[in-house]
Image (spheres, rainbow, N blue to C red):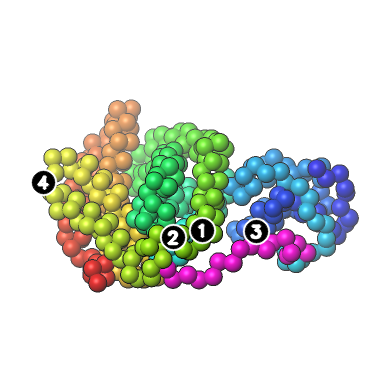
Amino acid sequence: MSTTVTSLHETEFFDTDSLRLLRNHLTLGIQNGRWCLDTPDGPIRLAGSDRGVPPTLARLVRAYTRDDQLVPVARLRGGPAELRARLGDRLAAPSRPPDHSARGVVLQYVRAQIAALAAADLAVRREMPDSVHRLRVAARRLRGAFTAYAPVLGGRKLLKGLGGALRWLGGELAAARDTEVQWTRSRAWAWAREQTDAYFAQLTGEANARARRVLDSSRYLQLLNALEVLEVVLSEQPRREWPKAARRPAGKVLPRLARAVAEDVDGRVAVLLEAPDRKRAVHDIRKAAKRLRYALEAGAAVISVDGKALRAFQDLLGEFQDSVVAREHLRVLQARYGGFDAVLAAEADTAERCAEELPAAWRRIDLGPLWT
């Protein structure tokens, strides 16, 4: 803990012993009694004592520090560039040259999503717009890559626990995201603004409190650590020990693995209109379609499909789901206040229309590259 008072023009920088902040393009310092956390989204400033990092700032960067202690690492005149120059010899990292093997391509995507998860965590803690959505998407992208490309990432047994933890994280944050979406959707019911605002404000407060508890939990911290360990293990494992599929060129392996995901969607769409429980059937298609989307994203370097048609298909699935969730809230509002019958009926019609249009929308997607 620092007890040194910085001079008028000097900044005392804090980081973990392994420089976790600086490695992730963040810096934390104090000058003249003012703390500043520099982030890619802009600086965060806070008055405080020079005797230790304010808990508010320490909590913001937990996804990076993993509860390692923040200690003084340098005192100098200048900013992040000067700090990086001063500590450059401590920032040496293993070389990660471009690798066009199946594992290399997927692992590059995995690294990007691990970084996106941490960045979104910081945004959620700052209560920035759309941040919960960003966090959930990063988690789903990781799950999608692990599901589709397990054979080149060490096998399903290795990834099963991580997939379950990522599913848990997404589920815990679902209420915050769903409430955000539904509150926006309720703006169309202008005549009921007073009732809907009061209703969704309460739900938002509860959901955001739950999200904060999740991000501060030991289970979440264990997930972040496990993802980091996985990346290091997969990156540093000698190539001769990789599965044969992992060593092969990405273009020879990833389309075939993604095709299996596409075939799952195709089979589910084929029986949709005859399904006894259409809501469940569409929900399952939606989950499978997300797996396909993220598999295609992870393999984008060697797989090119009609992104516009796929987005249109997913938009229908998203609209169906939003309508289903909207009706759940509308039933509560109807029981409390009455007057929501017409909106309930309109949302039911929307869901029915989306379901009816799904097979044709699926057929418009050109997935030919997966079969070449």
- Residue 314 at x, y = what percent? 29, 56
Residue, x 69% and y 54% (percent of image)? 19
- CA separation in Å, label 4 and label 3: 53 Å
User: In terms of sequence position, does the residue under pointer 1 or pointer 4 come before the other?
Assistant: 1
Whether residue 332 is visible: yes
Predominant SS of the magenta segment: loop
Q: Check disc 2 and report its element: helix, strand or loop.
A: loop
- CA separation in Å, label 1 and label 3: 22 Å
Mark toward the viewer: 1 or 4: 1
- CA separation in Å, label 1 and label 4: 48 Å
- CA separation in Å, label 2 and label 4: 44 Å
User: In terms of sequence position, does the residue under pointer 4 or pointer 3 come before the other?
Assistant: 3
Q: Which mark is residue 237?
A: 1
User: In terms of sequence position, does the residue under pointer 3 or pointer 2 come before the other?
Assistant: 3
- Residue 346 at x, y = what percent? 22, 44
The stretch of residues the image draws in magenta is 86-101
Residue at the spot of label 4: 274
Q: Pick the residue in front: 366 or 221.
A: 221
Residue at the spot of label 2: 242
Q: Which mark is residue 23?
A: 3
- CA separation in Å, label 3 and label 2: 28 Å
